[in-house]
Image (cartoon, helix red, strand yellow):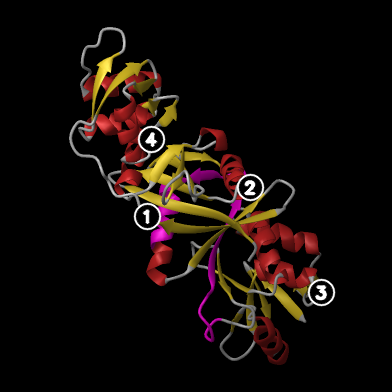
Amino acid sequence: MAGELRGEMVVVEDPAEASTIHNKGSYGEPRSGGGLSLTLLEAVYLVETERLAVTRGGEPLPTRALVRAAASAYDQFEIKYVVYRDLRQRGYVAVEGPGLPDFHVFPRGGAPGRTPAKFWVLAISERAVFDAEDLAAHLRKVAGVRKQLLLAVVDEESDLTYYAVRESSPRGRQAPALAGVVATAHLLEDRAMVVDEAQARALHAGGFYGRIVGRRLQLSLIETAHLLKAGAIELRNADTDRRIALPRLLAEARRIQPDFDLRFQVFEDLKGRGVVAKTGFKYGSHFRAYEGDPDRTHAKYLVHALPAKYRGMWPEVSRAVRLAHGVKKSLLFGVAGDEVGYIRLERVRP
């Protein structure tokens, strides 16, 4: 099929050839009066697959010249092309979106005008910034049109990893069962201890708080703050036995753990949802989260707390998702703003 480069598009003049390539793969936009306009992304792919020969000014155009033209016309052309090519090779019809997303992807056998798009796909370099606020905005946009958002992350060797991204609303079966002061806890530097065995076991049974060590209950700083705020414990200094109020505990917790407020907000939100949240340190996350009794069930989620305006790097995200997948758990980013929202990332093969 012959096409001519005109500005930032390639035009196929022959109506029969144009109709064939458009009907078989939904390439390009039909022109009034016949013919077809192809984007440079489509043109490079069709040249690579030997279905198009491009000219400029009546002379054959070398592939490298076509690629140079495409690279100057697109921001991050090579990243977008790797994703476009992969989707086409998988049998999908991928159509460039105006702005974001990069591609509207139709199911195998589907096409624009005949079937709704299956995915919205963003093409991303591994060196791009992971922006939690932008990602949340994309999810809200996708939810409004009922599409599945896929992030196609291209590494430096042009290998692709796809991530399905969804909003999540974790729910547990652990109803709050604490009322009034049930225990006296003593603060020991970066944790607290309930020494009385009966109080320790009652508090643990009331929400799976802490860890029973011998006959005592050991509480993390976050659990201690949560229980003190709820009025379920009174807190005393281990050395002087003086009572410690919540503001003083929070000030001490922030000194020990600078991101304490962020983690505490997500922890409190999870507890409000009936989710049992325990430390996720051994899994490289902030929390492991259970829908029920952690002694009888496995954690369903690994939860990492992020500020609403968090900006990081994709290799960090890749490690977190890979680790969660390796231990058969779902990774949730708890994004803490005025409220806490949850974003679930999962590796997929489209």
Q: Earlier in the sequence, mark 4 or mark 1?
A: 1
Instruction: Say which amino acid is labelled 3.
Output: Glu
Instruction: Please state which amino acid type lies under the numbered disc 1.
Output: Arg
Q: Which element type, helix, strand or loop, lies under badge 2?
A: helix
Amino acid of disc 2: Gly
Q: Secondary structure at mark 3?
A: loop
Q: Nearer the viewer, mark 2 or mark 3?
A: 2
User: Element under label 4?
Assistant: helix
Residue 338: horizontal and vertical position, in percent? 27, 44
In the picture of the structure, the residue carrying the numbered disc 3 is 50
Q: Position of residue 69 (x, y in %)?
A: 69, 60
Spatial CA span between label 4 and label 3: 55 Å
Q: Is residue 49 magenta?
A: no
Asked whether disc 4 touches disc 1, contact meaning CB atoms under 8 Å apart, the reply is no
Residue 171: image tag: 1
Q: Between tags 3 and 1, which lies in front? A: 1
Asked if one can make out residue 56 in the rendered structure from this viewpoint, the answer is no
Q: Is residue 299 above or below residue 230?
A: below
Earlier sequence position, callout 2 versus callout 3:
3
* Stretch in magenta: 112-140
Report if the CB atoms under discs 2 and 3 are less than 8 Å apart.
no
Q: Earlier in the sequence, mark 1 or mark 2?
A: 1
Query: Mark 4 belongs to which amino acid?
Result: Arg
- Asked if labels 2 and 4 touch by Cβ distance under 8 angstroms, the answer is no
Residue of label 4 = 263
Q: Secondary structure at mark 1?
A: loop
Picture quadrant where residue 66 is located: bottom right
Q: Residues within 10 Å of mark 1 (few under 14, many from 20)?
A: some
Q: Which of pointers 3 and 1 lies earlier in the amino acid sequence?
A: 3
Residue highlighted by disc 2:
326
